[in-house]
Image: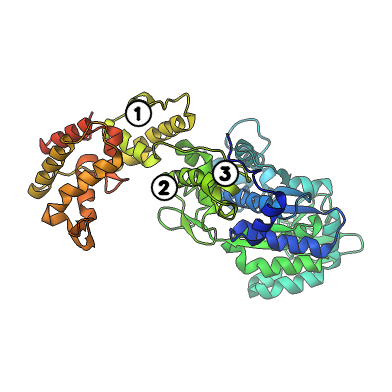
Amino acid sequence: MSADATAIAPSDLLEAAKVSKAWPFEEARKIVERVEKRGEADPVVLFETGYGPSGLPHIGTFGEVARTTMVRRAFEVLMPGVRTRLLCFSDDMDGMRKIPDNVPDRAFLEPYLHMPLTAVPNPFGGNYESFGHHNNAMLRRFLDTFGFEYEFASATDYYKSGRFDTILKRVAERYDAIMAIMLPSLGPERRATYSPFLPISPKTGRVLYVPMKKVNAADATITFDDEDGEETTIPVTGGHVKLQWKPDFGARWAALGVDFEMFGKDHGPNMGIYDRICQALGGQPPEHFVYELFLDEKGEKISKSKGNGLTIDEWLTYAPTESLALYMFQRPRQAKKLYFDVIPRAVDEYYQLLAAYPRQDWKERLGNPVWHIHGGNPPAIELPVSFALLLNLVSASHAHDKGVLWGFISRHVPGVTPENHPELDRLAGYAIRYFDDFVKPTKVFRAPDAVEAAALAALSEKLGSLDAQADGETIQNALLDVARGIERYQDHTKKSPEGGPGVSVAFFQMIYQVLLGQERGPRFGSFVALYGIDNTRELIRRALAGEDLSKD
């Protein structure tokens, strides 16, 4: 079932979109202005994303497509009826400048350094024509799984089929103008040998970084010395050359008429160069969006060749794709860590936003990330149990299969079953895998000191006085009552409802450290309601008896 996305008149939806502060709408409004200035009778708006298949696709690659799709959908609301396309362009004719760290056999690839990626043998096995074809297939596999609407384009195909011939001839014709743009951005050494054309050696098949001896615009050829020193002349058309990466950006925009492309902050300093080359070749530069880069757990930029950070498949082992899309939506101009410990929060935030959506007005809906994640039609799902609580339940119960978790869930939320709540069942499986791989190895239980032991004993006694079916709020209040009576856990900067001191977070940190071997977690009252009062009291008994809580 989906939230009713049709409960607003198209004209009202358009007016709400025109003033929405969500970043996809802000970007889409720039494209609307661009299209209106062109004044075409039947415009087609081209969105593009670029991919360098020098390594396996990582989440940053996915994020670029997801974010571009969000802008595309926002544009379609602002200009209904205007046709749009999303082209995912792979620069797979690039030479392999270094061997990626994450290939099975580095020595196998050494003879193919500087060969176009689609001419390098595939080291991963399977029926793929080349390294580049394999990596392209990995990208398409995920984009298809997620349901993106896109067209895939290969630089090798475009160069070899002649689709870039016209623009390559124009580069030859305007060679001096392009060199005038490029040379000031280069150091003295590079400037002496630079050319926007990279010939593919007819003898070795490698991509050559060599100076041009002659550029003949009349017959669209270039002359250079091949690797063996022999002077060689080849046409710039038909896949005999490719362009250096900066001219390639501008030339591709001009050749294809790209209207929107986003890229990472590392491209930001070169954006003006791309634009000027596009203009020199007779094109109009697209609208840009520069996003911040993702970082690994050490704060270093993630890299396809290093294989650091998360892969697409790794995230999807532990969480639904929608949580990944949410992480891409949030704060795109802010550098963010992209590692396993960000997953649980992203999962719970996604479902919280999804639950809020039906209760929001349309202004709020258009600012809600789930509208953008689901292209304006998010499903109606409200989880009775959060992912964080599921993780704690796995921790306390030592569950190895979903059946154990469902025993607790069904008692806590009568009538909820795996059959009528498949989304929760899916999360239960994710929680078990995530706990086993990332939480369990880091758990460190500690013994309580005398004050803590007394506090836990008092807590157990208080829990024993409650109804077995007490809800999370009732249990949480009981926990607070216990803490307020212990001087160590009184926080005089806060006030209790009765006017006395509030409760220090140290009380709940102690509970998590002693009972669950963790530093923190969700509201402990909610956890007790799910896990059961008797089970929680048994956990406390075992901790006070000095038993090993890390074992079943």
Farthest-out residue, right:
218
> Mark number for residue 231?
none
Q: How is the image coloured?
A: rainbow
In the rendered image, which residue does mark 2 sit on?
345
In the rendered image, which residue does mark 3 sit on?
56
Is residue 79 at all visible to an observer of this figure? Answer: yes
In the rendered image, which residue does mark 1 sit on?
405
Marks 3 and 2: which is nearer the front? 2
What type is the residue that disc 2 sits on?
Arg
Q: Is residue 133 above or below residue 207?
A: above
Is residue 228 or residue 197 the one in the foreground? 197
Q: Position of residue 231 (x, y in %)?
A: 80, 60
Quick one: SS at disc 1? helix
Give the spatial CA distance, label 3 vs label 2: 26 Å
The residue at 88%/64% (across/down) is 217
Whether the residues at callouts 3 and 2 have beta carbons within 8 Å, the answer is no
Q: Is residue 532 above or below residue 25?
A: above
Q: Position of residue 105 (x, y in %)?
A: 52, 39
Mark closer to the chain start, 3 or 2? 3
Mark closer to the chain start, 1 or 3? 3
